[in-house]
Image (cartoon, grey):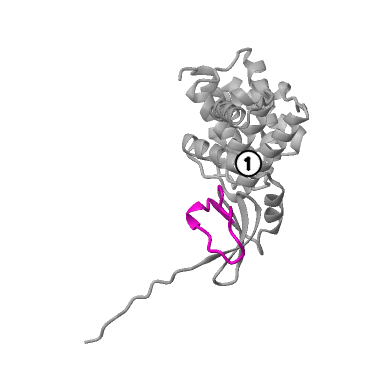
Amino acid sequence: MVAFFYIKVIRRMIFLKTFNNSAALVQDDQGQEQVVLGKGVGFGLKKGDKIDESKIERRFTATSHQDEVNQVKEINASTIDLTNKVIQMVEPLLNVKFNDFQYLALADHIDFALSRTEDHIDMSAANTRWEVKNLFPKEYKISERVIALINKEMKVNLPPSESIFMTYHFVNAASDNDQVQETVEITELISGIIDIIQYQYQMTLDTESFNYSRFITHLRVLLVRLLRNKHQKSGELDDSLLAFMKIKYNHAYDTAERIATYLHSKKGWTLNSDDKFYLVLHIWRVTNRQEN
């Protein structure tokens, strides 16, 4: 009878040095260095001590994330702890998962925001507050909760403009690795499109309606695709169908053409037949059925 013995391989994570109370440089048993984040992850340890892996909340491999490693070194320990609390609040509310880049971008922003507050610097965003609040209402409301948490934890009073910048980070987390600047650009374009529709129809759209929310989602997907120069093949839309849409939904079609002209003048983009078809449908819905 042959006996089989299973040996459990236990990997050790050895402490090398600390950057702050919440960030440390460690090495695994394969000799691979990592920067690990977590409250008190390196506190009281000496070189060669074993790391308590239950304290590790996020890790970066030094060889492949050197820029991120350098960035971690510059962030205050208290900010890393605070960022972890913010993410723990936000992820279940938005049903998202922050990747490493988004985590560091948020931590860096919070760290800089706290520094600006100490220096009494307010990067005013009053001109975009209405737009962001109405384009991303869910993320905006959560950003207000986050600002309240930061104010309470750090005993500060962040300016109202921070709710705008924080919203961009939360939109990014739910948007396939978008960067903040990309989100700002898309927000401005969507705002311009909404202005065109409201002018064309001489009405104020109901930002709380389901059709409005669905329209904003459609616009965001469309603009991200165009911004990243990802040309979607047309579904070979029958020309007669588009002609029918022009007759049946003449006002919406004319508005879609104005939006196409706007995007071409702003970015040099050209909408294909499919883009226009779905744009017409969304415009008709959002202007004719305002119920939630």
User: What residue did someone put label 1 on?
Assistant: 78
Task: State whether residue 278 is above or below residue 130.
Answer: below
Q: Quadrant of residue 206?
A: top right
Q: Check disc 1 and report its element: helix, strand or loop.
A: helix
Q: How many marks?
A: 1
Task: State whether residue 161 is above or below residue 89.
Answer: above
Q: Using a 10 Å C-alpha cutoff, classify the residue at mark 1 as few (fewer than 14 neighbours), some (14 to 19) or many (20 or more).
A: some
Q: Quadrant of residue 83?
A: top right
Question: In front: 281, or 26?
Answer: 26
Q: Amino acid at mark 1?
A: Ser
Measuring 68% from the left and 42% from the top, which residue is drawn there?
108
Q: Position of residue 249 (x, y in %)?
A: 55, 23
Image quarter hosting the N terminus? bottom left
Q: Residue furthest bottom?
A: 1
Q: Position of residue 95 (x, y in %)?
A: 47, 39
Magenta segment range?
39-59
Q: Residue furthest top?
A: 202
